Amino acid sequence: MYQVTVEPTGDVVEVEEGQTILDASLRQGVWLPFACGHGTCGTCKVQVLEGDVDIGDASPFALMDMERDEGKVLACCAIPEGDVVIEADIDVDPDFLGYPIEDFEATVVAIEDLSPTIKGVRFELDHPIQFQAGQYINLNLPGVEGARAFSIANKPSENTVLDLHVRRVPEGAGTGYIHEQLQVGEKLSVSGPYGQFFTRKSAPEDLIFIAGGSGLSSPQSMVLDLLEQGDARKITLLQGARNLAELYNRELFEQLAQEYENFTYVPALDNPLPEDNWQGFAGYVHEAAIEHFSGHFAGHKAYLCGPPPMIDAAITALMQGRLFERDIYMERFLTAA
Ligand code: FES
């Protein structure tokens, strides 16, 4: 066991033999910036001030020779060879709670068809999880190499369960397993929470959530959490889907919109079928946002979650409608194949 001291905060992390600095830090509630988690993006770069570190599998593009010579390492691959002191660029958002990452045993208690392409899976955990609405977990599946990331759809106060929305990705081994083989009663290993998508509760602005496909999971958790906490700001959820069968959990949000005066729900179908007899907004979800807000978004914070083309279109619409980059938070579809 070695000690890693993280400057400038002075936090001390205990690292087991063979464990990376990032893994040890996150598990002990010491937050370090990271994204890919496997040495290719460079987000987790830190400076070693004292001690020896094995740089592990750092890609030469993410950590250049010159940087290696300067004593920089990627925390997600770096394994200490003794006590070390590192310096990290920690710019933590005041609304980020930095809950430690833990391992859980998760038992499948329900599987349902939310839409023709999306399954809802509920797990019961062996001990409670602390997370912020919007965050995700990693799920390990038998016979599937590598963990799959899924956003948590339930609210944080329901801390002994995990609800996941899983869209079947063609040829995807992980989502294929969940859609075709997963059984109620099965036990899987889960780790989390991860991610930097969370509600900025200290910001006074009204909130807009724009969700597409199974990207509804994070906004669902965030909206349920805000309403449960009695948040008085105006909250608008815009949900996009192809057709009526793909527009899942609509009844839940219609009911919430009746119950809470400050909550508005706007579903949009971009390809409604004739038999849908759709009376709501027909078009893309960003177009529904433009119509609903008459093209003016100033005074809001926006949270986007869905496939990249939806996110890009929504960013353009929001910025044309006078939101700035700092007002927009997003989670591009996690590529859980
Ligand atoms: Fe991407 Fe470490 S998190 S390189």
Image (cartoon, helix red, strand yellow):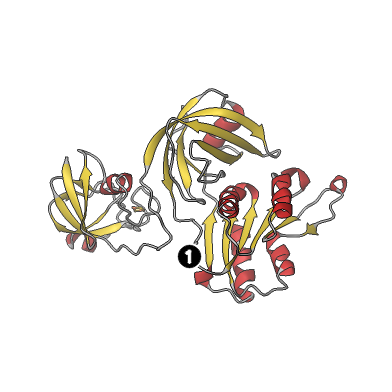
Q: How many marks?
A: 1
Residue 158 percent coordinates (x, y): 52, 40
Residue 150 relative to residue 117: left or right: left
Residue 296 relative to residue 49: left or right: right
Residue 281 percent coordinates (x, y): 79, 59
Query: Which secondary structure lies at badge 1?
Result: loop
Residue 179, placed above or below residue 312:
above
Q: Quadrant of residue 171?
A: top right
Residue 65 percent coordinates (x, y): 23, 60
Badge 1 amino acid: Ser
**Observer-nearest residue: 170 or 252?**
252
Q: Quadrant of residue 74?
A: bottom left
The residue that mark 1 highlights is 202
**Observer-nearest residue: 30 or 64?**
30
Task: Please tell me which residue is depicted at 24% across the width and 60% down the height of the picture.
Answer: 9
**Observer-nearest residue: 173 or 270?**
270
